[in-house]
Amino acid sequence: MPDQTGGSVEIVGSEAAFGQYVVEAKTEIADGQIVPYRADITVVVPNVKTGVANVKRALTAHAQAGVTVDQVESVWDVALGLAFAVSAVNRLSRKSPGEIRQLLQQGRQLRRIMLLSLRSCVEAQIIPEEAENVKAILRGSGAIDAAQDLIDAVATMNKHWDVLKNKVPITPDMLKEGATVGAELLRVLKPAAVPPNAELPPETQEAVTARDRLWTLLLKRHEEWVWKPGAAAYGKAVDQYVPRLQSRVFLKEHDPKAPVTTGDTTSTAISTPGK
């Protein structure tokens, strides 16, 4: 659980929480229900910390809503598991200068083979309609161009694969490799240019899927076990006690000795120790 001091939170994550809740997320969140993670973990974690602490204060209110203290506290653990998952994806996405050079060399080699094949097929009138497209790809220079050219060459190959597959020294595995290497180069060199459906290396894709499942689980459980009980406890003032996950209006945990306002009435908060 978070501390009750209202101090700053160090976003370190928890491997143990990740291991527990990624399993629950696989069971509870179907593939079609996954919400891609597009948040800032340094915003999400403090907001979960505040909401969990303030809902815990309103034990009577959230007990009436059918939510237990353990369920409320577990949302904090899900957030720590998510923080670990986010860090794992970030680590896999970072490349050393040597790794970037190696990846660029691999990408340029694939680009050269594919462009030679495409140019030959254009000149042989196999795919004459791609003449201008191939010329545009050939004009590329520099590292970012090499990455984008590779992606474009793969797309052109895939578009005409039924015609080209027996006429070029390219295999389906090479096309898949080209798509992955091109996207990875763009991700390293120009992240904003990476398409949302770009190919990822298997290890990175697995980490991204785990992160997104945990994010979806957090969205679901925070809504059911923190936000709704908070609304029941604090009424229209809920936003002062339970911030939305991506809210940048940071709130403090309220004094545990202060009364809990529930609608138009006031009741004394029940204090419980943290885990």
Image: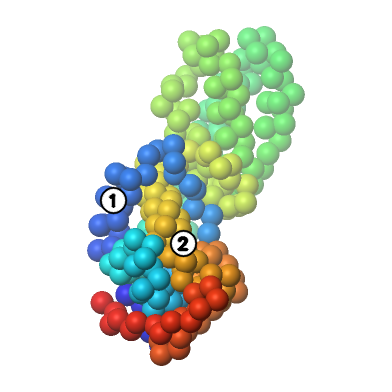
Where residue 149 sits, quadrant-wise, is top right
Which is nearer the eye, 233 or 159? 233
Residue 134 is situated, as x and y percent measured from the top left of the image, at: 68, 26
**For the view shown, which residue lies furthest in the front direction?**
265
- Measuring 62% from the left and 51% from the top, which residue is drawn there? 192
Q: Residue at x 52, y 11 (%)?
A: 162
Which tag, 1 or 2, sits closer to the chain's start?
1
Q: Which residue is mark 2?
A: 228
Image quarter for residue 153?
A: top right
Q: Is residue 27 above or below residue 109?
A: below
Judge whether residue 40 can be spotted in this image: no
Can you identify the residue that label 1 sits on?
A: 24
Secondary structure under tag 1 reads: helix
Percent position of residue 161, x then y = 53, 16
Q: How many residues crowd mark 2 within 10 Å: few (<14), some (14–19), many (20+)?
A: many
Q: Amino acid at mark 2?
A: Lys
Q: Residue at x 49, y 14 (%)?
A: 165
Quadrant in which the N terminus is drawn: bottom left
Q: Is residue 256 visible?
A: yes
The image quadrant of residue 28 is: top left
User: In this figure, which colouring scheme has been used for the structure?
Assistant: rainbow
The residue shown at (29%, 44%) is 27
Residue 146 versus residue 6 in the image, above or below: above
Indicate which label's residue lies in the foreground, 1 or 2. Answer: 2
Position of 70 with respect to 139 (left or right) is left
Left or right? Give the position of 123 relative to 166: right
